[in-house]
Image (cartoon, rainbow, N blue to C red):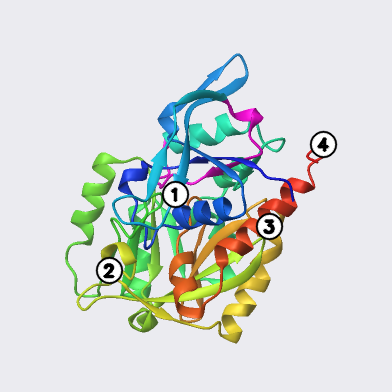
Amino acid sequence: MRKLKVAVQMDPMESINIDADSSFALMLEAQARGHALWHYEVRHMALRDGRLFARVRPVTVRRERGQHFSFGVEERADLAMMDVVLMRQDPPFDMAYITATHLLEHIHPRTLVVNDPASVRNAPEKILVTRFPELMPPTLITWDLEAIRAFRDEFRDIIVKPLYGNGGAGVFRIREDDENLASLLEMHFARSREPLMFQRYEPAVRRGDKRIVLVDGEPVGAVNRVPAAGEARSNMHVGGRPEKSALSPREREICARIGSTLREQGLIFVGIDVIGDYLTEINVTSPTGIQEIARFDGSNPAGSIWDAIEAKRASIPGSA
């Protein structure tokens, strides 16, 4: 495999946690393979006369806290001259995020964008998963208050989620005797025109919410995330405890059912969330979890991701 020119579109390097950040792990792996790295933020992009440019800086990474990166001299780069662009900025999945996918379509697939920007735009975390209702807990997406009340009456104990957030922000558990649902809905719809997602609460979450990483539709590892005491959310951003975990037969079945869809849509690096026997989310924007998986089972998910990227890049006509 020839050495690649890789631009990483992500959040500021200063802000990342080198012990958990999946983008950092991907950059370390790319560097170890001899690929050249550049870093830029979404706000540094500019589309001019059909050509997509960004103010990029060459970057070297190392696993040293407080000294985990070094930048070279900033330059204005035509992103079409890159071999690969990793789209790794964190959500929220708002109009700025959507606009970035439109801009990146000007260079993809001649420059391989991971994940495919059109598929990312069309498959946000809590929407793509609804294509597999037979794998999910009972789920409702709506603005309609009557439909919400009927769902709550049916299932009693429910979870309320914003459609386009991340890291567990804005997720609530509403128990049968909770009197706050009406106020919560009033607050949300007063400031947003977006619908909400409602799911039946799954008690199995007390045993953990499993993150499974799939590479080109195939599972490469998993980590269980156990909620902290007094917390309904298991996200590690809010205190969830990671635990070593193998895949159950049901989880392998879920991966097999969704794998071909992920491959067809060019979603190379995906993280799914499974609670008990149910698929709850398919994360395609900026999935996490590969560092925790690597620590627990000694595998190298970042290596598997780069194997897939290199193979996909080599298959593009004229890429040799």
100 above or below 195?
A: above
Q: Earlier in the sequence, mark 1 or mark 4?
A: 1
Q: Which residue is mark 4?
A: 318
The percent coordinates of residue 319 (x first, y second) are: 78, 39
Disc number placed over residue 308 in the picture, else none: 3
Give the side of residue 35 with respect to residue 312, left or right: left
Q: Nearer the viewer, mark 1 or mark 4?
A: 1
Which residue is situated farthest in the top direction here? 49
Give the side of residue 217 with respect to residue 27, left or right: right
Q: Which residue is mark 1?
A: 61
Q: Is residue 126 visible?
A: no
Residue ID at (80%, 41%): 320
Amino acid on which the number 2 mark rests in the picture? Arg
Q: Nearer the viewer, mark 2 or mark 4?
A: 4
SS of the residue at dot 3?
Answer: helix
Magenta part of the chain? 78-95
